[in-house]
Structures are given as structure tokens and as C-alpha cells.
Image: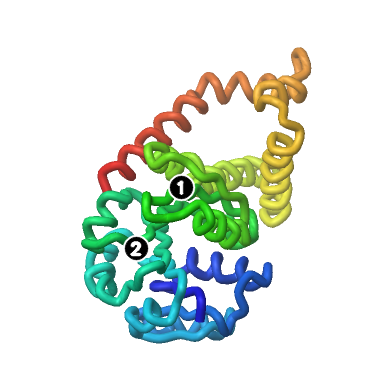
Amino acid sequence: MKLGFIGTGNMAGAIMGGIIKKGIFKPEEIIGSDIFEPGRERAKAEYGINVTADNKEVVESSEIVVLSVKPQFYASTIAEIKDSVKEGQIIITIAPGKTLEWLGEQFGKAVKIIRTMPNTPAMVGEGMTAACPNEHVTEEELKYAVSILSAFGKVEVVPERLMDVVVSTSGSSPAYVFMFIEAMADAAVADGMPRAQAYKFAAQAVYGSAKMVLETGKHPGELKDMVCSPGGTTIEAVRVLENMGFRSAVIEAMKACAEISKNM
């Protein structure tokens, strides 16, 4: 086996699914461990991977290991596996707040570590992942890791000082977007649109708008201005959003998110 996951939750599943779909690894080349038996059995049934309850078995069987447990379990998990980590093995982390320096201290030896921050749209192949390697990772190894991470969306290599900003900008932001879609749908329902149809209209509008930003290369403000006719409906909606502090609320929420990430 070449690729191992310690933890088989939603994010691990999203990564596995993308990797298998793109043919980067076959299911039989992947192993996942989870102390929660229903979780690992679900991963086995859904993706056809090998599973185990033993974290050390994952490390001993894999070239690359993804630590996909919750941040609060990182210290105990690393303490359990650190003696099994081999020279040349790559460890990929996906926990906010766990710096390369902290991770290195936990392993207590020279280990190739790539700190990443993916997000849940990876589940539909539209993830956004930031990656930051430590000094032991070669350019070739980083390139290989990026090719794996690209299986479920876009990847950018960033300096570590930006990782907490990444958490607020893409790691946590799907929650903000889902709230926005839900609010738009609630308003549509209040005006008489059936609930399922309201979600479809709102979600497609967000998806299409995001695609316009990415594919046209135009500034979001310019794209907004294109929709706002003088004296029209859209500029009136924008006026109300500005009056209610829409942009300020988003900025303050993201700054609070980044601050929590720094102190995890």
C-alpha cells in the first residue's frame, strides 16, 4: 500500500474519493485506520480501501500518511506513531493551528511534513487546498504531494504565515456560503417559491457567480457593477446589504476565525 489515512472521517473520505476517481491510487493501494469501527467500515464499503484499527499498521504500510484526525487528537496520535515513521516517508497534515514547528517537536526527529488546509467542497471535486512543506521536503516530493491534493480540487503552495488566513478564507468559509444560500432560499420561500426550488436557484447563482470570478479574471467589484443598473432592483438590494453591515460582518467573522486558528 502506498497511501495511508489515520482517521477516515468526511474530509479523509473526500480526499480518498477524489484520488481514486482520478486514478492516482487504486483502492487496494490505500489503507485507513479509525478507532471508530463503523467509520472505517463505511470507508471500506464506500471506497473499497483496506482498513484497520491500528494506526501503526497504516504508517508501516504507506509511503505517504495523511493525519486526518481532529486537531485535539494530533499530539496523542503522533506520540503513538512517531517511532514507526520511516526515513523518506511523507506526512500530510490537515489540522488548523498545528504549525510545522509544533509538528516537528511532536515527532522529535527529522520528518518530511507537508501542512495543508483543504475544505469540504473536496467532496464534490471542487476543493481549495493550501500546502506548506517543511525544510525536509524536496521540490520533487512537494510536486508529487500537490499532484495528489489536486485530485479533489485546486492547490496553492503558500508560506506558513498565511495558513491561518487560509483557514478563514477557504477552510471555514463553506459554512458562511451555506448560510448565505440558506438565507437567500428563506427569502425566496417567504415570497412564495417552493423550498427545493429556492435552494436550487440560490445555490446555482452562487456557483455561477464564483465561476465568473475565476474564469473572467474580472474584479468582483466590476462584476457586481455589471449587474447593478441605475435605479434598478439589484442596486437597491446592495444598498440594503451595505446598510446592514454585510461586508463588515464577513470581514469580522473571518478575522475571528483566523484568530481562533492561531491559538489552537
Q: Is residue 42 visible?
A: yes
Q: Describe the element under mark 1 as helix, strand or loop.
A: loop
Rendering coords of residue 160 (x, y %):
39, 42
Drawn side of residue 182 relative to residue 165, left or right:
right
Furthest toward the top, the residue is 230
Give the Cα distance between marks 2 and 1: 15 Å
Rendering coords of residue 2 (x, y %):
51, 76
| Mark 2 closeness class: few <14, some 14–19, many ≥20 residues within 10 Å | few
**Image-quadrant location for residue 105:** bottom left
In the rendered image, the vertical position of residue 263 relative to residue 153, given as above or below:
above
Per the rendering, the mark at residue 70 is 2
For badge 2, the amino acid type reads: Lys
Drawn side of residue 109 relative to residue 8, left or right:
left
Drawn side of residue 230 relative to residue 107, left or right:
right
For badge 1, the amino acid type reads: Ser
In the rendered image, the vertical position of residue 229 relative to residue 142, given as above or below:
above
Rendering coords of residue 150 (x, y %):
61, 57
The total number of labels drawn is 2
Per the rendering, the mark at residue 172 is 1
